[in-house]
Amino acid sequence: MAKHRFLPMTEQDEKEMLEAIGISSIDELFEDIPEQVRFKGEYNIKQAKPEHELVKELSSMAEKNVNLKTHPSFLGAGVYDHYIPVIVDHVISRSEFYTAYTPYQPEISQGELQAIFEFQTMICELTGMDVANSSMYDGGTALAEAAMLSCGQTRRKKVLVSSAIHPESRDVLRTYAKGQYIEVVEIPTKNGLTDLEALQQAINDDVAAVIVQYPNFFGQIEPLKEIEPIVHKYKSLFVVSSNPLALGLLTPPGHFSADIVVGDAQPFGIPTSFGGPHCGFFAVTKKLMRKVPGRLVGQTTDEDGKRGFVLTLQAREQHIRRDKATSNICSNQALNALAASVAMTALGKKGIKEMAMQNIQKAQYAKKAMQANGLEIVFNGSHFNEFVVKLREPVKTVNERLLQKGIIGGYDLGRDYPDLANHMLVAVTELRTKAEIDDFVKELGDSHE
């Protein structure tokens, strides 16, 4: 059995199980389903193959995928190709972490509890907030949960959200809001930033929260200092969705009196993996601590006075009365939170700052090279590692051409913003070399002629 990575079931096993429940065939298990609705015939799937042939076929299919080991990528839009220290994979592959579930029993879970506690601490440092939870599923659900918390706290039923927030996060928010009968109003953008005049006109005493992204979906840096007084004038909550790597250099939202800061820890130690899984983070002021979704790990001392860690707050319906629960979130992303913690620890404060600086510098280099090549850069504000370039033909056409040259191009903004058809969102991380950027710019310039 030791050779198997799974436990196969034999015909004898099947026979013994049927005997144990007192039936003679598998068909008897389905007797409650009317005969006329049962499927009869053969499924439209391939015949079974020997294991070695199956592995060969699946491997050849997998090799058709374009991946970041073979192609330089300028695609970001929420999932980024960043440096991951080798130690990250080593630590998260240890069986104590890899197979661990919720650390309900602190006496046997100190390692995992401490790792989550360190994650919370580092998120608080980056965001400038008082308290962070043990993680969320991803940035999108963290943002939606922030809106729900805001509505519960203020007892209001309207949320204002910038249209410069990630389109998928806005979709998740609308899904959450529908079930809670909450009105979601989008605030338009002006020159790539949230339109402050439109925000001032839309906000009133009915608004529970104003949500902005920092840097926003176009890579631009929102003026949090100017937005904050508009929000708090009406006692609404100020929610900021952030890229944690950018916070290595940018002033943390907590320093602009944000009430809730959310985001996705994917830039730290979590590979792109064709789109997931991710690890959301959720940080708040001390005032909102008991309304935080998910769970918190706290520090304490045992009977001998030694430092220890426990699950402190679990404000979810599984543990408390349903009407008192703050969220339906029933789990967290402990393994991915651990990956982020290990990456942040390995990089350190100086490393994170340097990594963030390289993102800014390389994005600036790419932007200037494009302008020198006759390409039009849209939006002229400050940006982090993403910016928008205007093309003369559909982005899809350009990206197909780039792919033939071995390059993964940027994001087609026309998919989500009809007025930005033929506009590409370009991401340049610290992993992109000068040669890769120059090749990308040359190919974009050639397609522009």
Image (cartoon, rainbow, N blue to C red):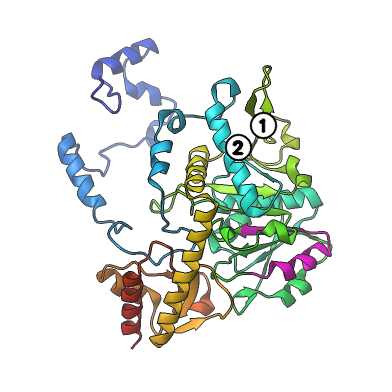
What stretch of residues is rendered in magenta? 222-241
Give the left or right position of residue 395, taking residue 123 as reference: left
The image quarter containing residue 241 is bottom right
Q: Are marks 1 and 2 in contact (CB under 8 Å)?
A: yes
On the image, the x and y values in percent for residue 322 come to: 72, 34
Give the left or right position of residue 107, taking residue 366 as reference: right
What residue is pinned by disc 2? 117
The image quarter containing residue 193 is bottom right
Dot 2 falls on a residue whose secondary structure is: helix
- Which residue: 29% across, 59% down? 66
The amino acid pointed to by label 1 is Gln
Residue at mark 1 to residue at mark 2: CA–CA distance: 8 Å
Quadrant in which the N terminus appears = top left
Front-most of 247 and 376?
247
Dot 1 falls on a residue whose secondary structure is: strand
Examine the rendered structure and indicate whether residue 1 appears above or below residue 175: above
Q: Is residue 315 magenta?
A: no
Within 10 Å of the Cα at label 1, are there few (<14), some (14-19), or many (20+) other Cα atoms? Answer: few
Rendered image: mark on residue 299: 1
Rendered image: mark on residue 284: none
Residue that sits furthest to the front in the current view:
350
Q: Is residue 225 magenta?
A: yes
On the image, the x and y values in percent for residue 191 come to: 60, 80
Examine the rendered structure and indicate whether residue 76 appears above or below residue 86: below
Give the left or right position of residue 241, taking residue 354 as reference: right
On the image, the x and y values in percent for residue 282 come to: 63, 48
- Which residue: 75% across, 36% down? 323
